[in-house]
Amino acid sequence: MPKPHLIRLHLRGELSFGPGKAELMEKIRDLGSLQEAAGAMEMSYSKAWKLVKSLNEGFRDPIVILHRGGQHKGGAELTAEGAKLLALYQKAVAAAEKAALPSLEKMRAMLATD
């Protein structure tokens, strides 16, 4: 059975959090680099940087810390607040998917056969 689509949460004004930002944060967490995270998602570094900047500006505490390059290569990491945000989003998605499953199954039963 295909996985239901992930949800986008509109937090306030233009600030939202959805599958793209969540995946970027997961890649940053796993790869330790904004550039590598962007590359793994086939996203430009500029776009990834703008997403991180919007997250850091939109929340009270920083979500991602960027370390400048140079001799020590730099990197990126989620803060404790960033890890908490990602976990809360994943919990919300799981709850939404569970709640939607009965309706989704009924809709799939209505589909034309192949």
Image (cartoon, rainbow, N blue to C red):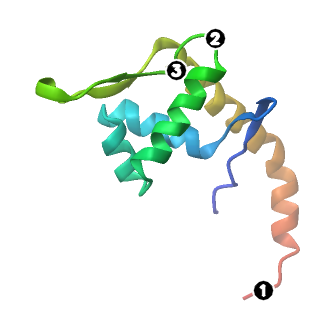
Decide: is 14 above or below 83. below
> Identity of the amino acid at label 1?
Thr
Residue at numbered disc 2: 60
> Identity of the amino acid at label 3?
Ile
Q: Earlier in the sequence, mark 1 or mark 3?
A: 3
Q: Residues within 10 Å of mark 3 (few under 14, many from 20)?
A: many
Q: Residues within 10 Å of mark 1 (few under 14, many from 20)?
A: few
Instruction: Write the residue at 56% across / 22% down.
Output: 56
Instruction: Write the residue at 52% across / 38% down.
Output: 50
Residue closest to the eye, 96 or 40? 40
Local secondary structure at mark 2? loop
Residue closest to the eye, 53 or 37? 53
Instruction: Determine the residue located farthest toward the bottom in the rendered image.
Output: 114
Residue 49 percent location from the top left of the image: 46, 37
Residue 105 percent location from the top left of the image: 81, 60
Instruction: Write the residue at 60% across / 21% down.
Output: 57
Q: Are marks 2 and 3 in contact (CB under 8 Å)?
A: no
Q: Give the quadrant of residue 36.
A: top left
Residue at numbered disc 1: 113
Residue at numbered disc 3: 63
Q: CA distance from mark 1 to mark 3?
A: 46 Å
Instruction: Write the residue at 45% across / 16% down.
Output: 79
Q: Are marks 2 and 1 in contact (CB under 8 Å)?
A: no
Judged by depth in the image, the label closer to the viewer, 2 or 1, is 2
Local secondary structure at mark 3? loop
Decide if residue 16 is on the left or right side of residue 78: right
